[in-house]
Image (cartoon, rainbow, N blue to C red):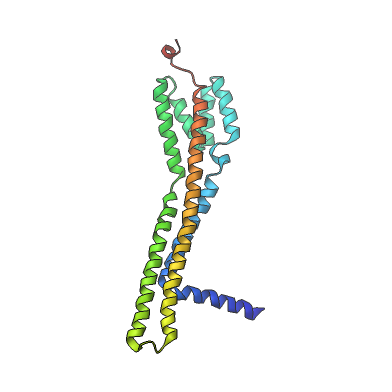
Amino acid sequence: MVEERLTLKEVKMELLTKGGVFVYLILIFSIFSIGIFIEKIWSLRMSKILPDNFLIAIDGLLKNHDFEKSLELCKKDNSPIARIVLVAINNIGKDPEIIKELVEAAGKQEVARLGRFEEGMSAVAATTPLLGLLGTVFGIIKAFNVIAAGGIGNPSLLASGISEALFATATGLGAAVVSYIAYKYIDGKLTNIAIELSNAATKILSTLPLKENDSL
């Protein structure tokens, strides 16, 4: 059992060294991408962005025109929807169109905040194939250097260069595919969140009092 485990470990290390330095760079980029993905999965939970308790409580307070408690609740909750509602409450009495524009701007700002570092996954998806290509080029150069030095009399050295080239390409493409899928998933999640925030904000806006001259 011990021998099998050691052999497996040696195989993994051999695979890493075969790709050269570029495979290590691809792995570092991939870890960075996975880190962003995990952070986004945690931070983009709907219960954190649109808490049911807050929505129920704020709806009741606004309908009763209890704006002082509404402000306290928004500051205490500090969720994305709470910060958007806070903008609306702070501008009560202004023209409804102005409030709507301010709320929309706040919503865009919240979505941008939630999407922080999302482009990092896209960057990894675009960069890792290029790193793999660089590894391929260096592997082929290594293979040609072997041929130039001693012909094809040493097939193992020649195969080593070709293996490095192919492994770097495969690793780069694999990392790119995973990062791109992760990026598109988070991007789609952010789009849904933006829609949900917009719907919730619109519902809350409908409970706010209009200016006196607008209600006539």
Along the line of sight, the residue nearer the viewer: 44 or 172:
172
Q: Residue furthest left?
A: 148
Instruction: Please provide percent x and percent y for residue 211.
Output: 43, 16
All told, the count of numbered labels is: 0
Instruction: Please provide percent x and percent y for residue 62.
Output: 54, 23
The answer to whether any part of residue 184 appears in the image is yes
Q: Residue at x 44, y 43 (%)?
A: 113
Q: In which quarter of the image is the N terminus?
A: bottom right
The answer to whether any part of residue 117 appears in the image is no
Q: Which residue is drawn at 41% across and 73% down?
A: 165
Q: In which image quadrant can residue 139 be found?
A: bottom left
Q: In which quarter of the image is the C terminus?
A: top left
Q: In which image quadrant can residue 94 be found?
A: top left
Q: Residue at x 44, y 72 (%)?
A: 166
Along the line of sight, the residue nearer the viewer: 75 or 177:
177
The answer to whether residue 4 is above or below residue 76 is below
Q: In which image quadrant can residue 144 be found?
A: bottom left
Instruction: Please provide percent x and percent y for residue 152.
Output: 38, 87
The answer to whether residue 172 is above or below residue 106 is below
Along the line of sight, the residue nearer the viewer: 31 or 136:
136
